Image: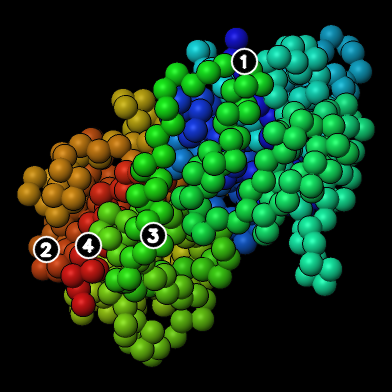
Amino acid sequence: MARYIFVTGGVVSSLGKGLSSASLAYLLKSQGYKVRLRKMDPYLNVDPGTMSPFQHGEVFVTDDGAETDLDLGHYERFTNISSKQSDNITTGRIYSDVIKRERKGGYLGKTVQVIPHITDRIKEFIKKDITNEDFVICEIGGTVGDIESLPFVEAIRQFSNENGKSKTLFIHLTFVPFLKSSDEIKTKPTQHSVKELRSIGIQPDIIICRSQQSISLDQRKKISLFCNVPIENVIETVDVRTIYEAPISFYNQKLDKQVLKFFKLKPKKRANLNPWKKITKIVLNTKKSVNIAIIGKYVNLKDAYKSLDEALVHGGIANNVKVNLIRIDSDNLKNNEIKTKLKNVSGLLIPGGFGKRGTEGKISAIKFARENKIPFLGICFGMQMAIIEFARNKLKIKKAGSTELEGKCYPVIGLINEWDKDGKIIKGTNKNLGGTMRLGLYEAKLRNNSAINRVYKSSSIKERHRHRYEVNNKLKSQFENKGLIFSGMSPDDKLPEIIELKSHPWFIGVQFHPEFKSRPLSPHPLFSSFIKASKNHK
Ligand code: GLN
């Protein structure tokens, strides 16, 4: 049976539970173990697909088309293990499953209650779809003590009781503040947080203390004593200089060692930290930089383009250059400002997006990049905007637009309701907003001798999608006659997946989201190539 590691958080949110879980997963994987990472989110949305990035940050999409929490992106980037639909669950999903079953009479007349019915469903999720994994690391969103996370914490308590203490490990991540005025570290919030956990029946086995300052042995002893955890299991994690240092830092603090010791296991091979050391060195020491502008609606929110920001850094790592992101809010972008705002920029990126607001600014910026031969990467909505720009300004279709944005337009982008996925027809609907998009991995065929063909060094690729609208394929020859070619198509030749400009050093638009598949240890070819072109631009 797999061993289960549950990661809870205390004192405050945003302590880096995701990063800690992902780092631990890397360390266990690199010592020869098979690991799976899962996230339980305590909110009532069935999935984060309909949540605004303003509220919740990016929606991460998996190969199998699940719209999930952005922490799954961290997991994938650190472990290179592709997440699945079955790796993320929310309170909303749990309740909706239980209520659906109740409506069908599935509970045989019983009173349906949080305990046992909701907690049973949570335990089913924890165990589902696990085959020969050695470790399943489950992160519980939110902070211990929140009303929302209570059923999850109760469920993991029951899980441990039912599956055996030796098969389940509880890690609690807390905040250990440093008070400047008294020049000392305070352990009291950690003590309270552990007390809160214990009041619901969970005794943590390992406490990870997040702190801005190193925690002295005396303070660790205090935490050990008050929280009833062996001193060697009180692990400190001091802020790292870059997230790529996290696996190294946890290794130095012996987190993986204590986890293996708990389960009475030995490493099957030595942990390999060299790739992280190499990346950390590049990220911290590289002097050369390149300015990349991102024009989007959510640029002011830190996590709204998480995978994209990361993928650009990966592209920088591949080219030994630091990527400076110039974030430009599309809402306030005036046409006459574009020239000045893009003055010192070596590359322009228009990311995915939804809705009319801010689109005209994006279209004008694309025109500027096209005419001034600035490297341009359009992702999903960004590619659609590039099509609109080209149709208006080169094909002279003045009313060219997307049916997503305006009722009356010449639809160069239109709503599609069916997609062919590996020979199976997937149907969309425009009635509900949740779960009705073209989602997950789809194949695209690349044209020989095209720029994209050279980027991928392959004639067939699979990338992750998340959109409802598609480029109108009927206009293909008109576009191509003017120099914008459809260099990547769906296997049935119906859907344009990639566009590129012939007479431009680097101008590519893709209907999918390459950022979801970029990894620090293997940067995505599109981002490496885009950054390379931008580096050569000036
Ligand atoms: N809004 C566009 C669509 O639904 C693009 C979505 C995106 O960029 N992810 O097709």
Sooner in the amino-acid sequence: mark 4 or mark 1: 1
Q: Are marks 2 and 1 in contact (CB under 8 Å)?
A: no
> Marks 4 and 3: which is nearer the front?
3
Distance CA(mark 4)–CA(mark 1):
48 Å
Is residue 434 toward the left or the right of residue 276 in the image? right
Distance CA(mark 4)–CA(mark 2):
18 Å
Q: Residues within 10 Å of mark 3 (few under 14, many from 20)?
A: many
Quadrant of the image for the N terminus? Answer: top right
Mark 3 lies on residue:
283
> Marks 2 and 1: which is nearer the front?
1
Q: Quadrant of residue 55?
A: bottom right
Nearest to the observer: residue 335 or residue 343: 343
Q: Are marks 4 and 2 in contact (CB under 8 Å)?
A: no
Q: Which mark is residue 502?
A: 2
Q: How is the image coloured?
A: rainbow
Distance CA(mark 3)–CA(mark 2):
34 Å
Sooner in the amino-acid sequence: mark 3 or mark 2: 3
Considering only vertical position in the picture, is 363 above or below 405?
Answer: below
Ligand 1 under 8 Å from disc 3 Cβ: no
- Return the x and y of residue 483 as percentages of the image width and height: 12, 64
Mark 1 lies on residue:
264
Distance CA(mark 3)–CA(mark 1):
37 Å
User: What residue sits 34% from the left and 36% below the top?
Assistant: 442
> Marks 3 and 1: which is nearer the front?
1
Mark 4 lies on residue:
532
